[in-house]
């Protein structure tokens, strides 16, 4: 339930707070007073985009806050075009706002009839009216999809399975014949670096070996002399040991460097071979994984898939049998859903006929037409609403023939008998379009009945509808400090008489009529 609507700096409204009642709320006012601003503010909360032109002159922002029972939505639009949306003081995206608001509000404007006029929505309306039980059907349908998905993993037919087997075998051979190991690429890249620097390495190592050879000879001589002096002074013994170790280490380094040079292959052919091998790995990575390890994992998985498909004959036969059985169960469950829908359609047709007669359309005909379709997640039915407003006219698709006034009444009749949005605040913008005064009384009765089950907010020009509301708000344009402003006032009983009389046309007779209308609704 929408308890409070606050509007700041929106067009002619500097600041307004409206506290709505739980049942039937009505908003009235002279043409141009600002009713469209109120509806625009609600659409803004619902997720519509607004131009910065709506921001009140001189203000930096426009803001709308909608307070529901457990949810507070605040949306702000700034003059630079930036906006901020918060739900319970937490920032959300526009998509998030629409998801939240759609669970709380349903706005039905003069031109907002697409849902009812679009055939793809008719099934949901019918199911909402009939409380169609889909759980059993959907469980059977989902099980069928699971079986089909499992079968498709073996290929859709024998030719497809052979194609998959050939593909798997090719991929297995291509990877296996490459004889990869997980560390190979790292080692090859390092080897490529070495080979690209072959000349630098050769020259440098030759110089180092020559220098170390000289140093090794000198260190050996010095070591021998120091050992000869140890008997003269025992304190030299530790230094002699250290020099011996250094000499030995120097000799080992020299030997290993010579061995490295002897083993090294710095030829151009070696570098080309490394690049060729890296190209092989690069090609496999492009097909099978980002790393060599990924490629080897893919190989293992493909080998498993190959063996699974190779030995799949019995499994496929079993799956086909199970799919046939499950398809029969789905068809049976779908037939039960169809029967329930057809029963609901008959009730909907009867009840709508009664309500449309009450709304001044005694000869209106409404029909739900069914078309059988391949079972899907919603059953095996497509439905479309057909309508005829006048006696002798053929029934045609609802969207093709309905006028604005007829649309308002049909929508209200459907909302009365099949409220597919329970728990939501229903907002009707000028539902009285195209209706006469007498029909206004009938519409007022339907709105009153609807308001017993859900909160409704109605913008109207008809006195009968205004008089039927539980709470009445006047939208009025005034001059304040040389500026035009729009305000919204809750009306007391005396003020309501004056406003309803204004809607009727004014004068003493209108006052009496207004008082009578308001009294008749109590």
Image: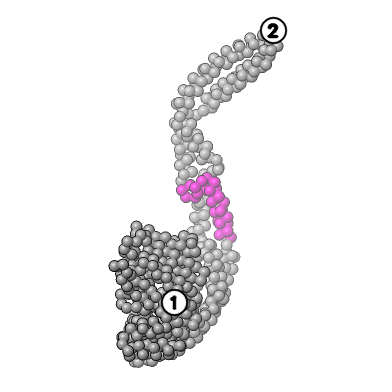
The residue positioned 54% from the left and 70% from the top of the image is 142
Residue 255 visible, this orientation = no
- For marks 1 and 2, give the one nearer the viewer: 1
Secondary element at image label 1? strand
Identify which residue, 66 or 412, lies in the foreground. 66
Contact between marks 1 and 2 (CB within 8 A): the answer is no
Using the image, determine if residue 4 lies above or below residue 60: below
x and y, in percent, of residue 281 in the image: 48, 43
Q: Residue under circle 1? A: 426
The boundaries of the magenta stretch are 285-311
Residue 384, by quadrant, is bottom left
Q: Which residue is mark 2?
A: 232
Task: Name the residue: 35% across, 68% down.
Answer: 13
> x, y (%) of residue 269?
45, 32
The verdict on residue 295 being magenta is yes
Q: Main secondary structure of the magenta part?
A: helix
Q: Is residue 111 magenta?
A: no
């Amino acid at each position: 339930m929408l308890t409070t609507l606050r509007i700041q700096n929106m067009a002619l409204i500097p600041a307004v707070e409206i506290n709505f009642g739980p049942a039937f709320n009505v908003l009235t006012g002279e043409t141009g007073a600002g009713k469209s601003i109120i509806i625009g503010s609600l659409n803004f909360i619902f997720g519509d985009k607004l131009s910065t032109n709506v921001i009140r002159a001189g203000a930096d922002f426009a803001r709308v806050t909608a307070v529901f029972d457990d949810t507070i939505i605040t949306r702000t639009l700034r003059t630079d075009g930036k906006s901020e949306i918060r739900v319970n003081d937490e920032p959300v995206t526009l998509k998030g706002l629409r998801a939240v608001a759609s669970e709380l509000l349903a706005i039905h404007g003069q031109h907002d009839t697409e849902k009812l006029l679009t055939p793809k929505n008719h099934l949901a309306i019918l199911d909402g009216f009939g409380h169609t039980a889909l759980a059993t059907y959907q469980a059977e349908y989902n099980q069928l999809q699971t079986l089909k998905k499992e079968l498709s993993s073996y290929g859709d037919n024998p030719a497809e399975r052979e194609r998959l087997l050939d593909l798997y075998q090719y991929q297995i051979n291509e990877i296996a014949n490459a004889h990869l190991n997980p560390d190979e690429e790292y080692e090859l890249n390092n080897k490529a670096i070495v080979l690209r620097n072959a000349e630098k390495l050769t020259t440098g190592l030759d110089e180092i070996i020559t220098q170390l050879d000289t140093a090794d000879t000198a260190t050996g001589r010095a070591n021998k002399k120091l050992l000869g002096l140890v008997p003269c002074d025992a304190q030299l013994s530790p230094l002699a040991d250290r020099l011996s170790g250094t000499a030995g280490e120097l000799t080992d380094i020299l030997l290993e460097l010579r061995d490295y040079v002897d083993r090294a292959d710095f030829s151009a052919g070696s570098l080309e071979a490394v690049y060729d091998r890296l190209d092989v790995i690069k090609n496999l990575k492009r097909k099978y994984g980002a790393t060599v390890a990924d490629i080897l994992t893919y190989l293992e998985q493909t080998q498993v898939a190959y063996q699974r498909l190779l030995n799949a004959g019995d499994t496929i036969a079993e799956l086909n049998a199970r799919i046939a059985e499950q398809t029969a169960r789905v068809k049976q469950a779908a037939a039960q859903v169809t029967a329930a829908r057809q029963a609901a359609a008959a009730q909907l047709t009867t009840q709508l006929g009664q309500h449309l007669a009450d709304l001044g359309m005694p000869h209106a005909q409404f029909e739900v037409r069914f078309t059988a379709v391949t079972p899907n997640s919603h059953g095996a039915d497509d439905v479309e609403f057909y309508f005829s407003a006048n006696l002798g006219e053929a029934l045609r698709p609802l969207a093709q023939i309905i006028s604005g006034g007829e649309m308002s009444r049909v929508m209200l009749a459907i909302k009365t008998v099949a409220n597919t949005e329970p728990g939501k605040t229903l907002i009707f913008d000028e539902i009285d379009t195209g209706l006469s005064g007498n029909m206004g009384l009938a519409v007022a009765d339907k709105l009153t009945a609807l308001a017993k089950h859900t909160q409704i907010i109605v913008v109207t020009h008809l006195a009968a509808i205004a008089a039927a509301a539980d709470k009445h708000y006047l939208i009025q344009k005034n001059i304040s400090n040389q500026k035009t402003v729009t305000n919204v006032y809750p009306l007391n009983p005396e003020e309501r008489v004056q406003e309803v009389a204004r809607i009727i046309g004014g004068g003493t007779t209108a006052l009496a009529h207004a008082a009578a209308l308001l009294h008749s609704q109590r």
